[in-house]
Image (cartoon, grey):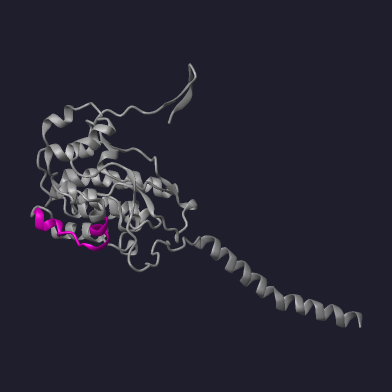
Amino acid sequence: MHDFGVDHGRLYIVMEYVPGQDLKSIIKDIKRFSIKEGLDLIIQICMGLGYAHRAGLVHCDVKPHNMIVTPEQRLKITDFGIARALSTINPHEHADIVWGSPQYFSPEQASGMAPSPASDVYSIGIIAYEMLTGQLPFISNDINELVRMHREQQPIPPHHLNPAIPEELGLIILKVLSKEPSARYRTADQLGRIFSSFAEQNAGKIQSQPVDPNLSNTTVILPKADNSKSNNRVSVTQPHRVNKPSQAQPSTQQELPNFDWGTIGLGLLTLLVAGGLIPFWLYVWFTVSSYFH
């Protein structure tokens, strides 16, 4: 947001104008991305969300509808409307009403549990799966069925749906779609490095397929309302009541603590130095005491 103000009693904000088209519409138009072009955009998604994660934010609604691709193939992430600050998230929280997009949210979000950066990573995996295979891993018109699929059902390996996907890349995507957050990559930055490394090591094997040239001339951003209506499945961000599992599931969202090893090292060094001075001060004490006696 660049600026804000009041005009004739109405509040307004000034934001960047981004020419282009939302990623969901592009997926619908071209059906399936080439590996190279798909990875280029997926890595940009990871870079953008990685920045948010480093700033202490979880997007909580990662989906292609909230991503705009410019004519220069630069991807921008939008709609942080339900984002959560990590500092406000209780890892043991549980809600009956959850926000998110059922086709793209993580199993823990579907269960009403606390989100984490790994939740955004799962959603990136759904988008990557859809971009490279041409279909979502879990498809249903019923929200509760989608919730069940995210919690319990294993997706078809992406390289089985699109033989052009290298098996190694398919396994990376399947890891990202793990049901347990601890089994995924923990942040979008980490996932981005994995995808970038794969792209560099397999640059010669990845064949670029042309994208519909008409897409590069598109300069209209589709309104969000139109995006949601154009999809015959549930795709909009909305609150919904989730069915609790029959048995309470322990929370797996607590992240491992981020230790400041530099500070810890200095503390240990200080302790060692202070401990080493104890014999010296005892020697001084006894020497002075014996002198006065």
Number of marks in the rendered image: 0
Residue 226 vertical placement versus 98 (above, below): above
Residue 1 in picture, x, y percent from top left: 43, 31
Q: Main secondary structure of the magenta part?
A: helix
The residue nearer to you, when weighing 63 against 70, is: 63
Q: Residue at x 15, y 39 (%)?
A: 28
Quadrant in which the C terminus is drawn: bottom right
The magenta region covers: 147-162
Residue 267 vertical placement versus 95 (above, below): below
Q: Residue furthest top?
A: 8
Residue 272 in picture, x, y percent from top left: 62, 72
Q: Is residue 202 visible?
A: yes
The residue nearer to you, when weighing 192 against 3, is: 3
The residue nearer to you, when weighing 54 against 269, is: 54
Q: Residue at x 21, y 62 (%)?
A: 153
Residue 107 in picture, x, y percent from top left: 30, 58
Residue 251 vertical placement versus 214 (above, below): below
Residue 19 in picture, x, y percent from top left: 27, 28
Q: Is residue 22 visible?
A: no
